[in-house]
Image (tube, rainbow, N blue to C red):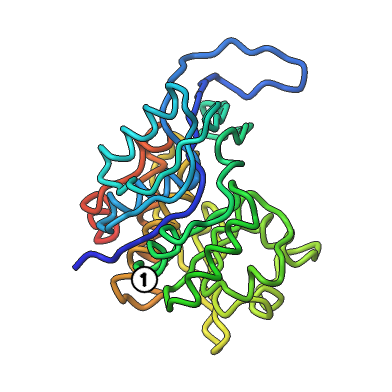
């Protein structure tokens, strides 16, 4: 049976502009194209988990505007369970994304309804308790992330925290995280150290995956395993949702019972498959695409 992945996080409408290069401060650059598509780290990871073969359930909040209607429809179309998705009066979250021809991007996020996702209900806590893995990020209030991880720990549901965007984290949250996924900037923000330090992270959580961009990923745990997993070499078009594809695939693989080192390798394949396409949710790879690259 496919693992049940409960994702508690953000849903945004992504407004994506493409240009030869990113503008400098105060500069206007003539773009090549514009697309509008659902995004947000939570929604992206829920869709990615469903495409990777998981039973994805999404907890979050959308606005009462037309963007909210589209977000809900796109999640459902991707096979994500939105039965407990909240609708908040007002604007949905929006992300303004600029992408250059080298696939680098710059992103500004206006949280909108995501900031109203507070105070977990008993029904939402039951959904978390029903999951094999709870997957959270930091684009919703930190108090909600903490409450979700606390509910998961009480129910015996494994927790993955993708600590993005970078920020300091409360001790109560870290105490309820089973697996932390960070990049090097996020690792520095959490530890307060000038360079990424895996031992400092392992003093806070039992397992860590540090993503290294083109260099792959590094997995370490308190029992002494510490290994770098090389990246898959592909031609990159857009790196926007690569981290979301990676983290969701990692959750699915762990939920299936795979060894975490193998799960990281499979997640690397998911991230690499994602960067070959433009955009966020529409670029997230299917299980077949992940398996094909993983086998190659």
Location of residue 27 (image quadrant): top right
Task: Pick the quarter of the image with the N terminus.
Answer: bottom left
- In the image, is 294 to the left or to the right of 217? left
Mark 1 burial class by Cα count in 10 Å: few <14, some 14-19, many 20+: many
Q: Answer above or below: position of 212 versus 171.
A: above
Secondary structure under tag 1 reads helix
Which residue does the image show at 56% across and 30% down from the upper left? 95
Callout count: 1
The extreme bottom residue here reads: 223
Q: Which is more toward the observer, 206 or 184?
A: 206
Residue 175 percent location from the top left of the image:
63, 76
Which residue does the image show at 80% across and 64% down from the upper left? 192
Location of residue 146 (image quadrant): bottom right
Q: Which is more toward the observer, 36 or 229?
A: 36
Which residue does the image show at 50% across and 24% down from the upper left? 16
- In the image, is 62 to the left or to the right of 192? left
Q: Answer above or below: position of 14 versus 197.
A: above
Q: Which is more toward the observer, 158 or 27?
A: 158
Task: Pick the quarter of the image with the C terminus.
Answer: bottom left
* Residue designated by label 1: 254
The extreme front residue here reads: 122
Which residue does the image show at 41% across and 75% down from the upper left? 260
Q: Answer above or below: position of 155 versus 107.
A: below
Q: Answer above or below: position of 222 versus 249.
A: below
Residue 185 percent location from the top left of the image:
69, 55
- In the image, is 76 to the left or to the right of 60? left
Residue 187 percent location from the top left of the image:
68, 62
- In the image, is 272 to the left or to the right of 184? left
Q: Which is more toward the observer, 16 or 170?
A: 170
């Amino acid at each position: 049976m496919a693992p049940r992945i409960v994702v508690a996080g953000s849903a945004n409408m992504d407004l994506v502009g493409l240009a030869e290069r990113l503008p400098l401060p105060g500069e206007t650059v003539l773009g090549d194209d514009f697309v509008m598509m659902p995004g947000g780290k939570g929604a992206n990871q829920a869709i990615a988990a469903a495409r990777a073969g998981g039973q994805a359930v999404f907890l979050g909040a959308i606005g009462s505007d037309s963007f909210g209607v589209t977000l809900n429809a796109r999640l459902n179309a991707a096979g994500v369970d939105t039965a407990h998705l909240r609708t908040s009066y007002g604007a949905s979250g929006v992300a303004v994304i600029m992408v250059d021809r080298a696939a680098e991007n710059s992103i500004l996020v206006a949280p909108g309804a995501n900031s109203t996702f507070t105070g977990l209900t008993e029904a939402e806590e039951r959904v978390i308790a029903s999951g094999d893995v709870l997957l959270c990020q930091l684009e919703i209030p930190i108090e909600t992330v903490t409450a979700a991880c606390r509910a998961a720990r009480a129910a015996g549901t494994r927790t993955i925290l993708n600590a993005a965007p970078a920020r300091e984290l409360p001790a109560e949250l870290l105490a309820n995280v089973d697996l932390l996924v960070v990049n090097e900037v996020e690792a520095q923000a959490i530890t307060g150290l000038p360079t990424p330090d895996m031992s400092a992270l392992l003093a806070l959580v039992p397992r860590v995956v540090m993503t290294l961009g083109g260099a792959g990923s590094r997995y370490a745990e308190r029992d002494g395993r510490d290994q770098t997993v090389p990246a898959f070499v592909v031609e990159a078009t857009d790196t926007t949702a690569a981290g979301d594809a990676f983290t969701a695939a990692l959750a699915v693989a762990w939920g299936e019972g795979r060894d975490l080192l193998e799960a990281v390798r499979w997640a690397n394949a998911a991230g690499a498959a994602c960067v070959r396409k433009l955009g966020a949710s529409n670029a997230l790879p299917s299980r077949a695409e992940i398996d094909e690259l993983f086998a190659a």
